[in-house]
Image (tube, grey):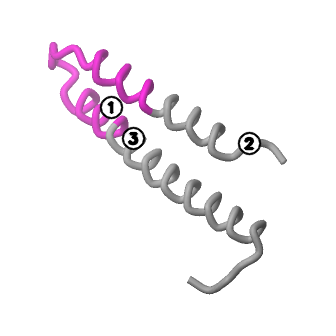
């Protein structure tokens, strides 16, 4: 890695953190959409997906909180 000003290194770290968070958020949203699609495809299905949906929502909220902590306001 070439030498950079400290402010530039911090920016690189923030960009990397945002990229990781975006990837995790996308995976969580995809999982939620798959659950919704499965429920819509089988309305007669009596499976209760509420726990899985709640877990996906909690994971998304946790990821959002981590993103806020890793990128404090300037």
Q: Which of marks 3 and 1 precedes in the sequence?
A: 3
Q: Is residue 2 above or below residue 56?
A: below
Front position among marks 2 and 3: 2
Label drawn at residue 44? none
> Disc 3 on helix, strand or loop?
helix
Q: Is residue 33 magenta?
A: yes
Query: Earlier along the polypeptide chain: callout 2 or callout 3?
Result: 3
Asked which secondary structure carries label 2, the reply is loop
* Residue range corresponding to the magenta coloring: 32-59
Place of residue 48 in the rendered image (x, y in percent of width and height, measured from the top left): 22, 14
Quarter-of-image position of residue 36? top left
- Which disc number belongs to residue 36? 1
Label 1 close to label 3 by CB (< 8 Å): no
Compute the Cα span from label 1 to label 3: 13 Å
Camera-nearest label, 1 or 2: 2
Residue that appears at 70% across and 62% down:
10
User: Is disc 1 surrounded by few (<14), some (14 to 19) or many (20+) residues within 10 Å?
Assistant: few
Name the residue located 47 percent from the left edge and 45 percent from the top edge.
25
Q: Which residue is mark 3?
A: 28
Drawn side of residue 26 relative to residue 6, left or right: left
Q: Main secondary structure of the magenta part?
A: helix
The reply to whether the magenta stretch includes residue 50 is: yes
Vertical placement of 1 versus 68: above or below? below
Q: Residues within 10 Å of mark 2 (few under 14, many from 20)?
A: few
Q: Nearer the viewer, residue 62 or 44?
A: 62
In the image, residue 64 lies at what x, y percent?
57, 36
The residue nearer to you, when weighing 67 against 9, is 9
Query: Which secondary structure lies at badge 1?
Result: helix
Quadrant where the image shows the N terminus: bottom right
């Amino acid at each position: 890695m070439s030498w950079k000003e400290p402010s530039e290194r911090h920016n690189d770290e923030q960009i990397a953190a945002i990229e990781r968070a975006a990837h995790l958020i996308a995976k969580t949203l995809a999982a939620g959409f798959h659950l919704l699609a499965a429920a819509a495809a089988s309305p007669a299905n009596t499976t209760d997906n509420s726990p899985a949906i709640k877990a996906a929502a909690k994971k998304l909220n946790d990821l959002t909180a981590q993103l806020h902590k890793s990128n404090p306001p300037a």
